[in-house]
Amino acid sequence: QSVLTQPPSVSAAPGQKVTISCSGSSSNIGNNYVSWYQQLPGTAPKVLIYDTNKRPSGIPDRFSGSKSGTSATLGITGLQTGDEADYYCGTWDSSLSAGVFGGGTKLTVL
Amino acid sequence: EVQLVESGGGLVQPGGSLRLSCAASGFTFRSYWMHWVRQAPGKGLVWVSHINSDGSSTNYADSVKGRFTISRDNAKNTLYLQMNSLRAEDTAVYYCAREGDTFYAMDVWGQGTTVTVSS
């Protein structure tokens, strides 16, 4: 099981909004920045959010990140069929001295 | 174009060894921390190891500690992962990734190389 906990799947209709949660502890999310990655089928992951709430250039503002305590959230608005992918949260765990990822969340756009 | 290209994957018997390479181009390789991340078939991402920019500091996941060694040659713009005592559970796609000018976020990824450990 992963150090960071994500729901296995979420779904919503095109045009709607969805949030994906990532739960951790004080040794990871609680005291470090979080990043989020999108992995489309058969491709390498791509960073969507870094430093908890910043978007790299080229990532639309439909994607947002936030954090509260030991949990982080990825929000996606205006859902498109092209957003169907697996999404992962990640950060550094200071107690483990290791990088950690969530188990991944599969987004289905109905 | 910023690019990472992995190579060296393949089929190896349990207990065997393999060395993965990751060739970097389009950026100043020596300035960045680098990571290896793996993904078993149908499973999620798992962090394997990282190395700092000059190669003086490394960290490993517990599952590979003592068996895998990360290294880099900044003159050749290449990252390596030496994998020894391979087990069936090491079977995965292995990605190299660059840590950007951020906190522990991987902003450039290679296409991955597949390692299969089987007799």
Image (cartoon, coloured by chain):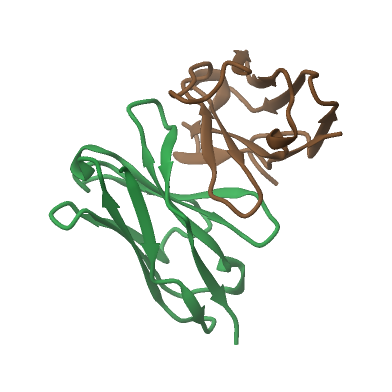
* Picture layout, residue B18 above or below residue B78: below
Quadrant occupied by the C terminus of chain A: top right
| Res. B60 visible in picture | no
Of the pair A84 and B21, the residue shown nearer to us = A84
Residue at x 71% of width, y 17% of height:
A77
Residue at the spot x=60%, y=17% of the render?
A: A64
Residue B111 % position (x, y): 47, 55
* x 60%, y 73%: residue: B88
Rendered residue at 47%/41% (across/down): A98
Instruction: Say above or below: B90 vs B111.
Output: below
Q: Colour of chain A?
A: brown
When the figure is inspected, residue A70 is found, relative to residue A92, above or below; the finding is above
Asked if B104 appears above or below B78 in the picture, the reply is: above
Q: Is residue A45 left or right of residue B33?
A: right
Farthest residue to the bottom: give it.
B119
Choose between A110 and B118: the one closer to the eye. A110
Colour of the chain lettered B: green
**Residue A56 image offset from top left, x and y in percent:** 45, 24
The number of callouts visible is: 0
Lateral position of residue B39 relative to residue B52, left or right:
right
Q: Quadrant of residue A48?
A: top right
Q: Position of residue B109 (x, y in %)?
A: 43, 46
Which is nearer the eye, B30 or B117? B30
Q: In the figure, residue A97 lies in which quadrant?
A: top left
Q: Is residue A72 visible?
A: yes
Q: Residue furthest left?
A: B75
